[in-house]
Amino acid sequence: MNSCPSTDQIRKTFLDFFASKDHLILPSYSLIPENDPTLLLVGAGMAPLKPYFTGERRPPHPRIATCQKCLRTPDIGQVGYTGRHATFFEMLGNFSFGDYFKEQAIIWSWEFVTEILQLSRERLWISIYREDEESFEIWSREIGIAEERIVRLGDEDNFWEIGPGPCGPCSEIYYDLGPEKGCGKPGCTLGCDCDRYLEVWNLVFTQFCREADGSLTNLKKTGIDTGAGLERLAMAMQGVTSLYEIDLISPIFKHFAAL
Ligand code: GLY
């Protein structure tokens, strides 16, 4: 891929990559959830696919990939204060329903960011759920990430859920925008509120169901749910440090600034 692709090219490249890995490519679902009274708006690629993870409905294919329109209400308070939060955004995702799991998801995500997008390995960092030794082994031994670049985080950052339903521990890929974007505080690392480490892709190892009473039960089949922020990948690829500067958003921003 060329060194400064458009956001449209990145979207297409992601979907083509997962089509080549036997994923069924579906169009985005509506931003308004259908038959899900637990969500006001769709805030993740997996939200419209919940019944496929729980086994309530049979997916049209065990592997799916989408680019989903999203609006994440818990992030609204941060929009405008950081360079990485948006109201509306697009989420790239690959999903497995009882098919591949942790190892394959990690291998493909790394192949995509380093070989297809050719992001600099020197800028990439990994987070894992603090007790997830299996992910640690895959990232360090199979992929070859230096141990000091694999950061263990807790429930707040690395256990993923969106209302009741399928959920699980996750592992994330971060892109370092450079010390000049950091807060400079001691201990600034992945998960810090500042703009230095940009989370570009979240890999969720879907194995639990959050019940309405708050308890966790095991899903009958494990799955994979990933979410990569399209506009954030575009930031990394286009060498800008705010999503307002990417090719898709900057003309809109400039138009309103002129008005
Ligand atoms: N479902 C994974 C994410 O939205 O980050």
Image (tube, grey):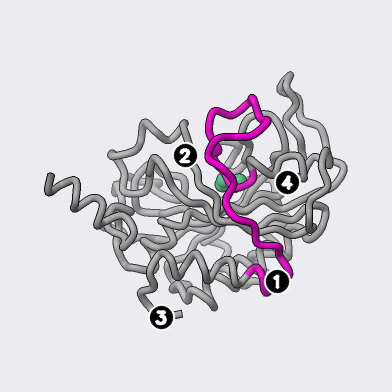
> Quadrant location of residue 159?
top right
Whichever of callouts 2 and 1 sits on the residue coming sooner in the sequence is 1
User: Mark 3 to mark 1: distance in Å?
Assistant: 22 Å
Residue where numbered disc 2 is placed: 71
What range is drawn magenta here? 18-46
Viewer-nearest residue: 66 or 233: 66
Residue 218 highlighted magenta (yes or no): no
Q: Residue lying at the far left in this picture: please name it.
A: 258
Residue 223: percent from the left, percent from the top? Answer: 76, 51
At horizontal 55% and vertical 35% (from top left) the residue drawn is 32
Residue 119: percent from the left, percent from the top? Answer: 45, 72
Tell me: is circle 3 under 8 Å from ligand 1: no
Residue where numbered disc 3 is placed: 2
> Quadrant location of residue 99?
bottom right
> Quadrant location of residue 21?
bottom right
Whichever of callouts 4 and 2 sits on the residue coming sooner in the sequence is 2
Residue where numbered disc 4 is placed: 206
* Secondary element at image label 3: loop
Point out the frontmost of discs 4 and 3: 3
Residue 157: percent from the left, percent from the top? Answer: 54, 41
User: Mark 2 to mark 1: distance in Å?
Assistant: 28 Å
Position of 154 with respect to 180 (left or right) is right
Q: Mark 2: give few (<14), some (14-19) or many (20+) Cα within 10 Å.
A: many
Q: Amino acid at mark 2?
A: Leu
Point out the frontmost of discs 4 and 2: 2
Q: Mark 4: give few (<14), some (14-19) or many (20+) Cα within 10 Å.
A: many
